[in-house]
Amino acid sequence: MCNEGVYAWENVRGALPIRMTFENVSSEPCTFALLRKAYKRLGYFPGGGEWLGSEGVPYFQPTICKFRHPRVSNSLMSECLSEAKISYVLTMGDSTAGRYSDALINTLTLNSEQLIIEEIKEDGFLPDKNYFTREMPDEVAQYVTSKFRFCCGCASKLHRAEFYSDNNSYFLNIEHIAQTMILDDSLQLTFPSYKGAAKVMDKVWAITTQELILRYYLKDKHPDVFLIFLPFVHAKENIRLSRLPMEIEYFKGLVEEYLPNTTKLFYITSYGEFEEQRKSSEWYKHLFEGMLARDKIDKMNRILYDVLEDDLLKRDGRYFGFFDLIDISEDRGNWSTDSVHMEVVWYESIMSMFWETYCNSVLLDMF
């Protein structure tokens, strides 16, 4: 799971079956309003479609709607970000989510220039408490402690930049917060044992890492767009399916409690793992609750949908889903680098799909 090499889509061009025609694709642009209709009709996130290629750039074309560009156009991005007036995009999840976050930035810089204002990153197995306490009040920061987490590729990072394109410019903060479990205690509040500590604990408290981050780290900087990648790659090893709904509900409740309604919440499904690409024979066809990893992750995605369904179907709500990435990734095994992580082309393709769907929704007023 910790293959942290850098990959480029040029590496896989030769292995990709490029198909230049695809019939029976809806001509409607992809929007979140259209996806909501699909959820209502299907009772799940939509899959179905085909990987295509144009000038060597692979992209996915779903059947329910149409993406106009292999990579979202710069003019669309510039117009939509100006219209939406967003300044802070947050992702949360494990190392795969971190790669999606990098792809968000890469998508923005495909046809534009950027002036990097600030970059901060934590590193290693131990969460960097200084990364988070810099945004916390002193009465909280002094009690924050961290402990080992089982993910060598999980690191929080902030990218603050000004992007230039088509005589326009906009500032954007893109941040990724590492999360190895849906709920964990890798970052927590630890109070010394002394007289009066109870009074402090009445005012300063957080039960989980996620609550600590949402309550204190994000207290004065609420994201406009929050992409949530629940870490099912890790959770499949430790959480039974029977317990999963409770954990998702608890996390969902924390987000609702600490983030305002102006924050749009996008829950993104996990893609499947590929047994043939495993680096260790110990994990090859290993079973989790009697299922291969891909099958259990698929069930976890479906539980996620069941928990969120009522909120996803609300018009003018703050909850949004996306596509069924298990289905979309099914024939992309040649992009898998270690069974868990994918080539950069995957993350850039999916984030281009996200940005185009988001921008279409903004400009057509179809959230």
Image (cartoon, grey):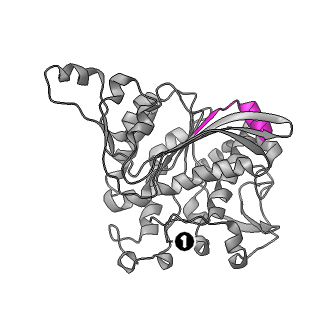
* Residue 339 spot, x, y in % from top left: 49, 71
Foreground residue among 296 and 86: 86
Rendered view: 324 above or below 40: below
- x%, y% of residue 362? 73, 36
Based on the displayed image, in which of its 4 quarters is residue 192 positioned? Answer: top left
Q: Secondary structure at mark 1?
A: loop
Amino acid residing under circle 1: Thr
Residue 358: x and y in percent read 69, 43
Q: Which residue is mark 1?
A: 337
The answer to whether residue 288 is seen in the rendering is yes
Tell which residue pokes out farthest to the right in this image: 167
* Residue at image coords 68%, 73%: 12
Task: Give the extent of the magenta segment.
Answer: 78-89
Q: Residue at x 65, y 32 (%)?
A: 87
* Image position of 360 (left or right of 36): right
Instruction: Please check the rendered image and state whether residue 82 is part of the magenta-colored stretch, yes or no.
Output: yes
Relative horizontal placement of residue 46, taking residue 298 as reference (left or right) = right
- Residue for point 66% across, 32% down: 86
Residue 59 picture location, percent across and down: 72, 63
Q: Residues within 10 Å of mark 1 (few under 14, many from 20)?
A: some
Question: Looking at the image, can residue 253 be seen?
Answer: no
Name above or below for residue 8 compared with residue 119.
below
Please name whichever residue, 42 or 301, is drawn nearer the observer in this view of the structure. Answer: 301
Q: Quadrant of residue 85?
A: top right
